[in-house]
Image (spheres, helix red, strand yellow):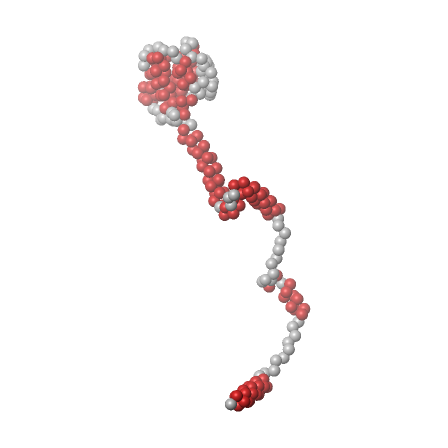
Amino acid sequence: MVQAIVDQDVADEGAIETAYLTLDTMLPQQEARNFDEAALAILRSDPRYQYEREVSQAPSAWDRFWDMVGDWIDAILKRLEDMTGLRLVSWFWDYIWFIVFAVALLIAVIALRGRVFSKVFARTAGEAGAVRTLEEDITADDLPEQLAEAERTGEWRKALRLQYLLVLRYLVDEGRISWKPQHTDRDYQAQLKDEDERLRFGRLSFIFKWVWYGEAMLDRGQYERLSVAFIDFRSRRAA
């Protein structure tokens, strides 16, 4: 029985081999083809067909600079890692753009804050607590002439400022204050010994700051009503 099975397998293998040989004679014969090596060399040198080769370029001076900066930062962070045990290097490079953005935003806010606050408050009554009269010399003899000219031309804000300067000159002439260019209106008010005079000067200072630094738009009638208190102060009458 076993021998019969073996004989059958051998006969089947022979039949399969005969079938493959018959099929091989039926397939078309393949002809070897030769390629033009010169044409291949030209194609290989054409950069348009460099699909797999990496074209490496030497790093520029700018690239080397940033590589140096990166190495310097890595060295510092690694030293801090050794001291603290924290993973600072990976954390820093993961959040580098957030850090740069936060620093830039902080710088912008500080710069903008300084600019905005200087523009908003530099000419208001709040800042005017440190008013200095650097532009004019209150001892100048022509202050009354300047006042008359401002009133003639309708420069009511300037006229009120000159009224205030005349008050300061009156106090200097009377020996009640010591005038210095670096002094403020509060310094002058503090020098006044008479309580009533100190209060009246404070009101004049407030009016002056509101008009001049607050850039109040005055007309002739408003100026005349406000200037009465300055004139009364210089003539020693209670306002």
Q: Could you tell me how many numbered marks the image carries?
A: 0
Q: In the image, residue 150 lies at what x, y percent?
A: 40, 20
Q: Nearer the viewer, residue 203 or 26?
A: 26
Q: Nearer the viewer, residue 230 or 172?
A: 172
For image coordinates 46% across by 38% down, the residue present is 106
Q: Residue furthest top?
A: 174
Q: Nearer the viewer, residue 37 or 107?
A: 107
Task: Please indicate, yes or no, whether residue 77 appears anywhere in the rendered image.
Answer: no
Q: In the image, residue 203 lies at what x, y percent?
A: 34, 18
Residue 231 falls left or right of residue 25: left
Quarter of the image for residue 54 reads: bottom right
Residue 236 falls left or right of residue 74: left
- Residue 48 vs 133, above or below: the answer is below
For image coordinates 50% across by 46% down, the residue present is 91
For image coordinates 34% across by 24% down, the residue present is 219
- Residue 213 vs 21, above or below: the answer is above
For image coordinates 52% across by 43% down, the residue present is 85
Q: In the image, residue 68 lies at what x, y percent?
A: 60, 44
Q: In the image, residue 39 lies at what x, y percent?
A: 65, 69
- Residue 144 vs 105, above or below: the answer is above
In the rendered image, the quadrant that contains the C terminus is top left
